[in-house]
Amino acid sequence: MSEIERVKCLIIGSGPAGYTAAIYAARANMAPVLYEGMQPGGQLTTTNEVENFPGYPEGVTGPEMMVQLRAQAERFNTDVRSGWVTKVDFSGPIHKVWVDETKEIHAETVIISTGASAKYLGLESEQHYLKIGGGVSACAVCDGFFYRGQETIIVGAGDSACEEAHYLSKLCTKVTMLVRKDEFRASKIMADRVKKTENIEILFNTDTVEVLGDAHGVTGAKVRNNVTNEEQIIPATGFFVAIGHKPNTDIFKDWLELDETGYIINKPGTSKTNIPGVFVSGDAADHVYRQAITAAGTGCMAALDAERYLASLEG
């Protein structure tokens, strides 16, 4: 059996939350060890342009921004490692974590920054344009600005889909909303808001058959009415998917309090979980804002909370 490694601060996951937590923890002499996980840099690595993060007047690509955040964390001697946390045991004052099912780490504090993954339709054409950054997105607030003055499509039926459709309607000439069933899942007030918005067209009982495009990106979508089987092509340069997110928190469910969707429940106004010494930052707990800047803010909070927790033990 391999030797157990003991660390003062272990950060699980990267992205704006994890890297910011690392920057603050490192500057506080907590010698943080950060494991990047399966998608180093998190969801932003699939984002072509980031224009709404302060400090980048010309904008920046998601991957480039993550490289810079990582470099800043490493500048203060954060130990950034490749690896995937596969198991945890938070039963005692020392938190046990296993990496890649082999390496065992005992940490005085743990900061969880595992994020959430957007749910997509799973169409081959959708994934193609998502990967090339050519018009498929799961965040209208992040990417809607790039489609101002253009026509867009949004898929979804809940409050988030209605909210994002309404947001897009302020930027785009037309928004076509695709709803699989004959009614919204959203609250009445949100559904009424999109129904009353002139440039939002709602197509009920409608499924996406294929996302259409060319070498430059999305040009539209082929959709089918699932009652009549009638197909039509809707022109659009942006295809937004708003069918929910899944927080990457499954390995913590036996130890941490989660809500019905799987988001980690933190004590209001803090990054603290129900386990002393375990903190959460970013989209693993945030189902409301889900922005890079808010994730970075909670990463800062988690590091400060961890530092104060360690100080209380010493005192």
Image (cartoon, grey):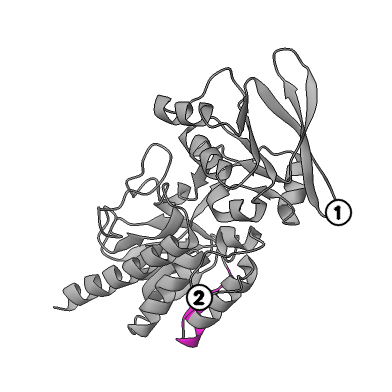
Callout 2 amino acid = Gly
- In which quadrant of the rendered view does residue 51 lie? bottom right
Please, which residue is most extreme toward the top here? 228
What label sits on residue 215 in the rendered view? 1
Residue 290: where, in percent of width, then height?
46, 53
Residue 104: where, in percent of width, then height?
45, 67
- Name the residue carrying label 2: 55
| Residue at image location 76% in from the left, 56% down from the top | 132
Residue 223: where, in percent of width, then height?
75, 28
Is 244 drawn above or below residue 294 in the view shown? Answer: above
Is 29 drawn above or below residue 304 in the view shown? Answer: below
The residue range painted magenta reads 73-82
Q: Secondary structure at mark 2?
A: loop
| Residue at image location 29% in from the left, 72% down from the top | 304
Q: Secondary structure at mark 1?
A: loop
| Residue at image location 43% in from the left, 75% down from the top | 22
Quadrant housing the C terminus: bottom left
Callout 1 amino acid = Ala
| Comes first in the chain, label 1 or label 2 | 2
Estimate how packed mark 2 is, as few (under 14), some (14 to 19) or many (20 or more) residues with alpha carbons within 10 Å: few
